[in-house]
Image (cartoon, rainbow, N blue to C red):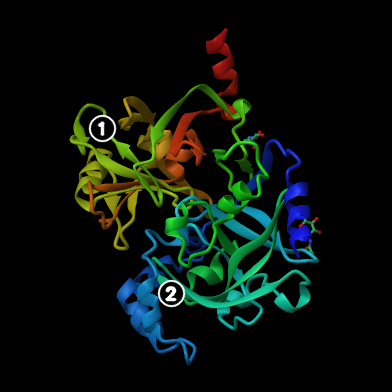
């Protein structure tokens, strides 16, 4: 019925301007495991190989595990994910919390047909209760760092804040293996990467938003608030532009070098003049779904030594909290602009009972890349620098984020 389509196009044209999606910061799976003294056991039991073998025989019958070969390897696991927001699917609305993830391009939530333990702990999508659900029939599989997820595709009305996206393709997971998703505070993931990164030939959410012309500009931006307390406010995803109140100074732009992840060129990483990584340049992925800054194992090892971080038996790097003020700055150069991270920014603090423990915000992982060495700029970087993702001009912008803590200082410096 052509007229229906026209009606939809007509009404979503109303200029929404900027759409603000509040983000909440919640305890990561890692933090929860640590607090309950289960982290070491978990890390020992869930080495990726062991994990995959253990669960391989548990896939639902009739789904050839070969299909999984098709899915791309996700660059990280969601153990450290912290920032979530609310969406709804269906008519009437069914609510879900999702990670807004620039490092993937799919939207998925747990299905009511899922019997995995992880699904039992989360809100599940009930297709039969929605009058707007369209069955698709295709299966999908997503390989996350520490497990495979399986599901079926469908189409639904998606609501993000005041915005309505019609006919959005999404996945309902019918099988969510492993413990990470059991403990996760989020129900699903909403990917904001390029379409080529999507598991199925679906249209990613922001592409639907652009196609339906629901935003004035093909731009979204992230503000991740820094707070000491896990339950403070938090952050904001802005669809349709950026908010000058949340950053100061100019926006520095970086062209996207490969339209899949939000991948850009990184000129170098320097530790207070002492050591320079990727002197001939490398690539960096800007990833809101990753918590730390990730780089090649060899480089990160040298960096950890330089900041006096000591390894634990499970591959984390501890830092003496008392030494934070004396640690060197780390300077990341992108497109001729220096981004300085102080130890206050790159050290992660966690409360264990009544004492504080400190961790390095850098993590080693050799990522497959056909080009230069690959780094990931996660929340450690993105909470210091407001990030702007421009699909119109295929570029990522950064500006100094304005945090309440610094607002007074900024004002004083401006005057
Ligand atoms: C969904 O979330 C909104 C916003 O928090 C809330 O007002 C509404 O009651 C929720 N709906 C359901 C069914 O939980
Ligand atoms: C950031 O956090 C501070 C307190 O930690 C709060 O006062 C401020 O409103 C927050 N900003 C935003 C935009 O959420």
Rendered residue at 37%/66% (across/down): 72
- The spot of residue 265 in percent (x, y) is 31, 38
Q: What element carries label 2?
A: strand
Counting from the top left corner in percent of width and height, residue 36 is at 51, 66
Q: Do the residues labelled 2 and 1 touch (CB within 8 Å)?
A: no
Q: Mark 2 points at which residue?
A: 148
Number of the label disc, if any, that sits on residue 137: none
Q: Can you tell me whether the CB of the residue at mark 2 lies under 8 Å from the nearest atom of ligand 1?
A: no
- In this view of the protein, can residue 24 be seen by the observer? no
Q: Which of 245 and 197 is in front in this view?
A: 197
Q: Where is residue 154 in the image (x, y as percent from the top left)?
A: 62, 72
Q: Assign ligand 1 to one image quadrant.
A: bottom right
Whether residue 287 sits left or right of residue 112 in the image: it is left
Could one spot residue 386 in this view of the protein?
A: yes
| Figure quadrant of the C terminus | top right
The N terminus lies in quadrant: bottom right
Rounded to the nearest whole Å, what is the CA distance between mark 2 and mark 1?
36 Å
Q: In this view, does 62 lie above or below 179?
A: below
- Furthest-top residue in this view: 415
């Amino acid at each position: 019925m052509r007229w229906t389509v026209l009606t939809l196009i007509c009404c979503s044209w109303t200029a929404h301007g900027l759409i603000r999606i509040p983000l909440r910061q919640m305890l990561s799976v890692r933090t929860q495991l640590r607090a309950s003294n289960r982290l070491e056991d978990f890390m020992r039991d869930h080495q990726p190989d062991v994990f995959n073998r253990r669960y391989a025989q548990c896939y639902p019958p009739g789904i050839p595990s070969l299909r999984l070969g098709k899915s791309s390897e996700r660059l990280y696991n969601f153990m450290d994910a912290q920032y979530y927001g609310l969406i709804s699917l269906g008519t009437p609305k069914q609510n879900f919390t999702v990670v807004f993830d620039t490092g993937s391009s799919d939207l998925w939530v747990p299905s009511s047909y899922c019997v995995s333990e992880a699904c039992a702990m989360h809100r599940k999508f009930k297709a039969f209760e929605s009058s707007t659900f369209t069955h698709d029939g295709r299966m999908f599989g997503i390989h996350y760092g520490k497990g495979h997820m399986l599901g079926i595709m469908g189409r639904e009305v998606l609501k993000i804040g005041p915005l309505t996206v019609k006919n959005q393709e999404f996945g309902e997971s019918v099988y969510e293996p492993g413990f990470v998703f059991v403990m996760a505070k989020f129900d699903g993931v909403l990917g904001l990467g390029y379409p080529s990164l999507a598991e199925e030939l679906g249209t990613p959410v922001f592409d639907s938003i652009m196609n339906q012309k629901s935003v004035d500009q093909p731009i979204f931006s992230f503000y991740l608030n820094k707070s000491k307390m896990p339950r403070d406010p938090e952050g904001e995803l802005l669809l349709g532009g950026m908010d000058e109140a949340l950053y100061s100074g100019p926006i520095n732009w970086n062209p996207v070098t490969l339209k899949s992840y939000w991948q850009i060129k990184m000129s170098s990483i320097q530790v207070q003049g002492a050591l320079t990584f990727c002197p001939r340049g490398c690539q960096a992925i800007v990833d809101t779904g990753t918590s730390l800054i990730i780089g090649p194992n060899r480089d990160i090892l040298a960096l950890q030594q330089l900041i006096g971080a000591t390894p634990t038996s499970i591959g984390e790097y501890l830092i003496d909290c008392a030494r934070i003020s004396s640690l060197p700055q780390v300077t990341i150069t992108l497109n001729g602009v220096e981004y300085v991270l102080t130890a206050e920014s790159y050290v992660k603090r966690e409360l264990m009972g009544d004492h504080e423990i400190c961790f390095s915000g850098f993590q080693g992982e050799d990522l497959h890349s056909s080009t230069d060495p690959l780094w990931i700029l996660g929340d450690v970087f993105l909470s210091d620098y407001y990030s702007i993702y421009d699909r119109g001009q295929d570029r990522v912008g950064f500006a100094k984020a304005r945090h309440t803590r610094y607002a007074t200082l900024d004002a004083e410096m401006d005057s």
